[in-house]
C-alpha cells in the first residue's frame, strides 16, 4: 500500500472518542502541519520511517508531506510526556500485537497513543481488563502489565 505523508497524518489525526483507549491523552484534530513540523528523522526505506524527537533538530520541511511511503502496516506511537512520536513499518499484525503488549506499549505510563494503519485506514481496537470490561488509559492501574489486559480488534 502507498501512503502520501499528508494523507497518513490525516488518518493519524482523526479525532478520538471517549471510547478510544488513549482519547484523553491524544485527541487528534491537530492538522497535518503539526506532525510535519515535529519530524527530526525521515528514513522511508527503514523499519522506523519517521521520528519526532524533541531533543533533536527538526527537519521542518513541509515538502515531506508529498512523499510516498510503501508499507502494508504502520504503527504510530506517541509519547505523551514529551510530544515525541515514531512511525514504524510492521511486517504483520503479530508484530503490532507484540509491540502493543511490550515494554513501550499500552501499559507504559508514557505511551500516549498507538495507532495502527492498515489498508489505508485506522485499525480500531479496544482494551479490556482481566474481567473483560472495556477500559481507557485512565482506568489502567499503575504497574499494569500485558497479562492484565487484552486487545480486541474492531471490525469496521
Image (cartoon, rainbow, N blue to C red):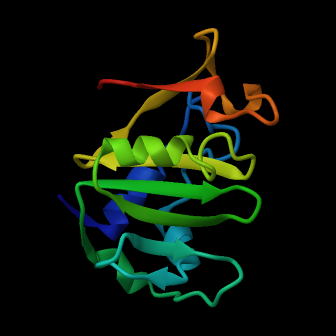
Image x and y of residue 51, in percent = 52, 74
The answer to which image quadrant residue 78 occupies is bottom right
Residue 70 pos. (x, y %) = 21, 67
Where residue 119 appears, as percent x and y from the top left, is 22, 46
Quadrant (top left, top right, bottom left, bottom right) of the C terminus? top left
Quarter of the figure with the N terminus? bottom left
Q: Extreme left residue here?
A: 1
22 to 85, vertically: above or below: above
Which is more toward the observer, 11 or 77? 77
Numbered-mark total: 0
Q: Residue at x 73, y 52 (%)?
A: 110
In this view, the residue in front, 90 or 36, is: 90
Residue 106 shown left or right of residue 48 in the figure:
right
Q: Is residue 23 above or below residue 63?
A: above
Left or right: 136 as drawn, with respect to 156: right
Give the left or right position of residue 55, taking residue 104 as reference: right
Residue occupying image coordinates x 63% and y 76%: 53
Front-most of 122 and 140? 140
At 42% from the left and 54% from the top, the residue drawn is 75
The spot of residue 21 in percent (x, y) is: 60, 32
Please give the name of the residue rendered at 53% of the width and 78% of the height, measured from the top-left corner: 39
Question: Which residue is the extreme one toward the front?
Answer: 147
In the rendered image, the vertical position of residue 103 relative to residue 123, given as above or below: below
Going by the picture, which residue comes out furthest to the right? 142
Amino acid at each position: 500500500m502507498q501512503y502520501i505523508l499528508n494523507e497518513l497524518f490525516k488518518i493519524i489525526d482523526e479525532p478520538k472518542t471517549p471510547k478510544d483507549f488513549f482519547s484523553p491523552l491524544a485527541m487528534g484534530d491537530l492538522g497535518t502541519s503539526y506532525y510535519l513540523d515535529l519530524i527530526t528523522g525521515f528514513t522511508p526505506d527503514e523499519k522506523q520511517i519517521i521520528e519526532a524527537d524533541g531533543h533533536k533538530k527538526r527537519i521542518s520541511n513541509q515538502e515531506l508531506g508529498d512523499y510516498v511511503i510503501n508499507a502494508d502496516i504502520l504503527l504510530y506511537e506517541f509519547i505523551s510526556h514529551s510530544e515525541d512520536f515514531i512511525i514504524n513499518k510492521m511486517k504483520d499484525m503479530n508484530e503490532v500485537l507484540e509491540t502493543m503488549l511490550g515494554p513501550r506499549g499500552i501499559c507504559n505510563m508514557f505511551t500516549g497513543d498507538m495507532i495502527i494503519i492498515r489498508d489505508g485506514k485506522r485499525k480500531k481496537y479496544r482494551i479490556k481488563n482481566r474481567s473483560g470490561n472495556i477500559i481507557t488509559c485512565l482506568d489502567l492501574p499503575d504497574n499494569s502489565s500485558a497479562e492484565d489486559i487484552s486487545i480486541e480488534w474492531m471490525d469496521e
